[in-house]
Amino acid sequence: MSDFLKNKSLVEVEGWLREEDPGRLEELWVAADETRRRLVGDEVHLRGLIEISNYCIRACAYCGLRAGHGDVERYRLSREEILECARLAVQFEYGTVVLQSGEDYGIKRGWLTDIIKTIKAQYNLAVTLSLGERPDEDLQEWREAGADRYLLRFETSDRELYERIHPPAKGQEISDRPAMLRRLKALGYEAGSGVMVGIPGQSYRILAEDILLFQNLDLDMIGVGPFIAHPETPLGRGEMPFASEGMQVPNTELMTYKTVALTRLVCPEANIPSTTALATINTALGRELGLSRGANVIMPNLSPVKYRALYEIYPAKACIDEAAEDCQGCMKGRIRSIGRIPGSGPGGRKKAVLPQE
């Protein structure tokens, strides 16, 4: 498979995104799975997701947590609730917790610093943060406190499309997320990003450029999921235009698998999750098919069940009512059912050792 997608050119990647022949696509799945096996192995790493707040200052055109969505009952987890979730992660033998929220400046720097230090000292877990755009001072202090990774999706590499779907908060300029990702790496974080597949206005060329930007940024983690808009948002109400006929990327399960597989081939060492969004559109086999087509991470939800329905980025998320205890058993069983191994330890990126000249 070493010559598969060997040029990694824009034309080549776009061609595979447009591919519909089942036989050719089977070649793509096999190449991605073999690359995953050789570069990151058969372990599937479990990252315990803790949705710590659904407050958000942003007005993203697709997200149910957006500022101004008045029907959302807002919450923030307490320090004690977050630490109880971390305790469960240890009990379930997860190596990482992911602290995720909307862009919530009610989460104060020092408060979160204390929580990170406590998780590292008491539970010895890797800590991933996914808190939106934060000042460098916050990011540096949290890194020094022990945070290992930071997730910040750039959503789309196309500037015009980004500005339509992700307007700045009041008083802020349009952000440059690729630049932020480079700063995160400079601060010593493993940096993760990703895109949605099938955003209205996203062409095949734009999505191909997204995949090549993953490579350019040398990302450690890459999340790819189908675009699912909350119905009470501009995109959910169909208020924004699609790309021209024959150019618009569909937000289908198949297109998402193509993007996952191509991402694995372009970024062979990256940690790539089989996302909750995939499990939402295919509850029976979405996660398993993602894992068999390049992915190597799953993020089971550790958040207290009473808060999960309130973290409604999009409706009808998979496993929203499933207790963490039941979820971890189900996930590990699904992993073993496809011949893979539940991972152990923090599961950071494995960088290949280059031969010396």
Image: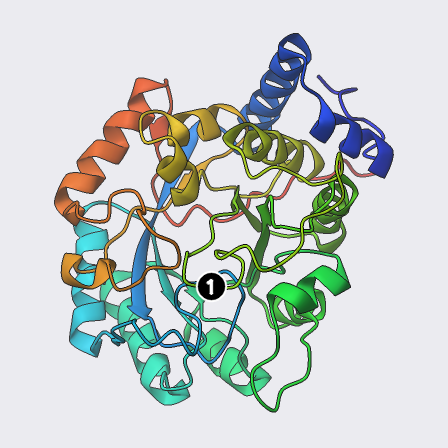
Question: Looking at the picture, does residue 26 appear above or below residue 210?
Answer: above
Residue at point 24%, 58% (across, down): 309
Pick whichever, 214 or 13, lies toward us.
13
Q: Position of residue 106 (x, y in %)?
A: 36, 86
Q: Is residue 189 left or right of residue 339?
A: right
Rendered location of residue 91, percent (x, y): 16, 49
Identify whether 206 is placed above or below 166: above
Circle 1 is placed at which residue position?
Answer: 233
Q: Position of residue 77 (x, y in %)?
A: 23, 74
Q: Position of residue 95 (x, y in %)?
A: 33, 50
Q: Residue at position x 29%, y 26% from top?
A: 334
Q: Secondary structure at mark 1?
A: loop
Q: Nearer the viewer, residue 322 or 292?
A: 322
Q: Residue at x 79, y 27 (%)?
A: 15
Q: Quadrant of the N terminus?
A: top right
In-image side of 267 versus 38 (left or right): right
The residue carrying pointer 1 sits among few (fewer than 14), some (14 to 19) or many (20 or more) residues within 10 Å by Cα, namely many
Front residue of 270 and 201:
201
In this rendering, the answer to whether 284 lies above or below 271 is: above
Q: Quadrant of residue 241?
A: bottom right
Q: How is the image coloured?
A: rainbow
Where residue 142 sits, quadrant-wise, is bottom left
Q: Amino acid at mark 1?
A: Thr
Q: In the rendered view, does 77 fall on the left or right side of 153?
A: left
Q: Residue furthest top?
A: 23
Q: Residue furthest bottom?
A: 171
